[in-house]
Amino acid sequence: MATGCTLPQLPRPQVLVARLRVVMASQQSRCHSFSSASRLQPQTSVTMDGSFLTEDKSTQKHKLPQKQRTLPYREIFEFFIEDFKTYKPLLSSIKNAYERMLAHQRETIRALEPLKAKLVNVNEECNERILAMRAEERHEISLLKKEKMNLLKLIDRKNEEKISLQSQVTKLRKNLAEEYLHYLSERDARKILIADLNELRYQREDMSLAQSPGIWGEDPVKLTLALKMTRQDLTRTQMELNTMKANFGDVVPRRDFEMQEKMNKDLQEQLDSLRASYEEVRKEHEILMQLHMSTLKERDQFYSELQEIQRTSTPRPDWSKCEDVVAGGSERWKMLAEGKNSDQLVDVLLEEIGSGLLREKDFFPGLGYGEAIPAFLRFDGLVENKKPSKKDVINLLKDAWKERLAEEQKETFPDFFFNFLEHRFGPNDAIAWAYTVFENIKLFRSNEVMSQFYAVLMGKWSENVYITQKKTVAQLLKEMTNADSQNEGLLTMEQFRERHRQASAGPCWPSCLPHSTILKSTFPLKTEEQIQELMEAGGWHPSSSNADLLNYRSLFMEDEEGQSEPFVQKLWEQYMNEKDEYLQQLKQELCIELHEEVTLPKLRGALMSIDPSLDKQTVNTYISQAFQLPESQLPEEGDEKEEGIVEILQTALERLQVIDIRRVGPQEPEPTS
């Protein structure tokens, strides 16, 4: 397009390039003293493409001061202003604007320098205040602890005073009873004495009347008439007495009748009770006879099976031969084999052999990076065996559980375990410790801590199973501690249990057994047999009296290898049995085979049928686990999409076995035939 204006005469590109090279060379020689590394950096090259300059990036811009970095650009810009006369005003205004902006930024930096110092001072003051507050809190805590100890001593003194006052009250009651009996005897003696005095007075009056001469001066006729009337009254009274004897000779007094009637009623009630007891005993005798006959049949069957087994089976192993093989000799083998059956002894022997082989290994082969390999074991190559002791591994697992319970559990348990090892031993040794711990917990299955950690780590159990069981044990210990008013760690059997015994013993013994009020309040859904098992595991026996003391804190202690006492082990065993029984009831309610498919509505209905007390949230949690669906994606109850969600029954039950599933409400009694 043609226009009436003419373009200004611009300098040739070759001239500009020469000037730029001179400026950059002088600038490089001037900046040579700032860094020796600048000799190794490439020189800045400038090329012309049309009317634009392209400059390579320089590595010196981070090492030179602000003025030194902008000096080449400033000089180049001045060259442009001098060469391009036509655009000199515009370029000068741009240069001045940049100069003003840089000056403003320098002023801002200088203004903010005091604020930085002030911020440092404020930070130091805050830190000093925090330290002062912490010191004050520690002082207050120490004062509160001293006050707590004083209060505990005051409570002990008050308890001693209470016991002393109770003993004084008992003694005073005894003295009062003795005084009362003494006063009663004195009152009776006084009454007898008064009666004797009255009798003596009457005798004296009769004797004085008999000795009085005035009575013989009466008229004989009057006395004869009085004698005759008296004889007539005597005859009439005698006749009335005979008539009364004839009419009422067989009549008994009302008081005797009422006594005999009451005695007869009591005897009748005793007779009815004995008849009812006789009927119960007769029925129980029939049941026992049937059980006896079935027991005889089972005995004969077992005897025949025993004969067959003795004829065909190999002889039992002589476990005493292991004494010379196991490290520690006969004493350690006796300790390991105490109370164990043959299957458990085989496990113990395998653990001893495996532990010896494990100590001999210096390296483990890496399992690779396959999808089936757990995340904390994914490694290719040889892994060092750290060779810790069994006690060290157990302590490490306990520390891992403590840290897991303290955090918010945002990551999966295997990832947490590997992160815990990295934090504990560093990233370089984490994989070695992961392989070492894994091989140990896989080997020592008889150890409670290792077996539970292995089950959670490999996904056989949800960690909520372990956490919930620990919370249950802690709650039971809290209940027992609350019942211990003296805080001595001891409970009497009367506090620990409540007896319900009948007057007679015999076949009714299951209904006569005691049950613990503390256990029953903590586990309201457990049966009397389960409560009885827990009490026997805790040290109760039928001959225990109410005055026997129970050290309840010893029930929750652990040995060096983390093994719990029989009481806690029985709690865990009952929990696993209750879970298996619950899932078995669920399978029976569904009335389908394990290889068949179950729909979501049918599983929901079966859960509500065997346990009507389940709330909606718990049911959704169970269903989400069984069908491996997030709770947010579960269709509403009654939705048509529910019928399209199916799963193999065996797979669903195996998934439910992983989580903490238990009965919420009491089980409905089965209808009697």
Image (cartoon, helix red, strand yellow):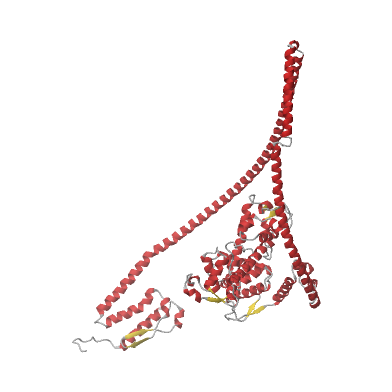
**Would you place residue 256 above or below residue 536 in this image?**
above
Left or right of 111: which side holds 623? right
* Front residue (pair 381, 578): 578
* Front residue (pair 518, 155): 518
**The quarter of the displayed image where residue 92 is located:** bottom left
> Residue 89, position in %: x, y?
25, 78
> Residue 173, position in %: x, y?
68, 37
In which quadrant of the rendered image does the C terminus lie? bottom right
> Residue 667, position in %: x, y?
60, 63
In which quadrant of the rendered image does the N terminus lie? bottom left
* Front residue (pair 410, 512): 512
**Would you place residue 81 above or below residue 221 in this image?**
below
Q: How many marks?
A: 0
**Would you place residue 134 above or below residue 443 in this image?**
above
**The quarter of the displayed image where residue 586 is located:** bottom right
Query: Which residue does the image show at 40% across and 74% down from the upper left?
Result: 65
Residue 196 seen in the figure: yes
Query: Which residue does the image show at 69% across and 45% down from the upper left?
Result: 265
> Residue 623, position in %: x, y?
54, 71
Left or right of 8: which side holds 498? right
* Front residue (pair 158, 5): 158
Q: Identify the residue at the far left of this view.
A: 4
Residue 411 seen in the figure: no
